[in-house]
Image: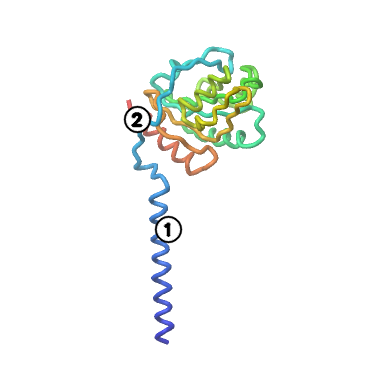
Amino acid sequence: MINVRKKTIYYLIFFVALSLLFYGIAVWFIPDYNNRKLEPISKVAKFRFTNQDGQAFTNKDVEGKVYVAEFFFTTCPGICPMMNDNMKQVYEKYKDEPDFRILSYTCDPKTDSATRLKVYADSMKVNTDKWVFLTGRKDSLYNMARFSYSIDDANNNLTHIEDDFIHSQLWALVNRKGEVMAIYDGLKQKEINGLIKDIKKELKTL
């Protein structure tokens, strides 16, 4: 009987210790979006692209605004539809916020003309004053992804731009100063929820 009690106590101690270990790992590795302080990762360079209406769109159009940047392509059969369905959560939350924007850059400008992006935007049923779809030169687009928004490994840059391709589910949050503050996985609901909280914080910063 005593041995059985000892074993029971040992098992209880073991499971309590294991639970505390998992809790510690969760606290250490899972971002606390309520309390964490964001620090700039990179600075967005000046840019000029073409929006879904065929009009020029530059960094001046988001000056003093908070925005989220992503890269996708309209013919993507895989992650892009899921990613933009998730982005719509962010859009619905902040579509009435005057100082917030979403910028969706194509990573397949050969296919995604302004006209095609317009059709895509219409299918999403979003206000393109708030959620802007952009195309332009491939090298300029890819440099933005890698060096301005830090959502793709710069070492992936191939010698021949025609052989290069970006396919990333990562989103960049940019503050009012044009600084990238954090990167999020657009396929993970926890990170999307964190982004929504971080946007609110950045909008309060003037």
Disc 2: CA contacts within 10 A as few (<14), some (14-19) or many (>=20): few
What x and y, as percent, mark residue 1? 42, 87
What x and y, as percent, mark residue 35? 34, 42
Task: Pick whichever of labels 1 and 2 is earlier in the sequence.
Answer: 1
Residues 177 and 165: in front is 165
What type is the residue that disc 2 sits on?
Answer: Lys
Identity of the residue drawn at 55% across and 20% down: 139
Q: Which residue is mark 2?
A: 204
Q: Which residue is mark 1?
A: 22
Q: Residue furthest bottom?
A: 1
In the displayed structure, 16 sits above or below 151; it is below
Disc 1: CA contacts within 10 A as few (<14), some (14-19) or many (>=20): few
Q: Secondary structure at mark 2?
A: helix
Q: Is residue 118 left or right of residue 40?
A: right
What type is the residue that disc 1 sits on?
Answer: Phe
Coloration mode: rainbow
The alpha-carbon separation of the residues under discs 1 and 2 comes to 34 Å
Q: Quadrant of the C terminus?
A: top left
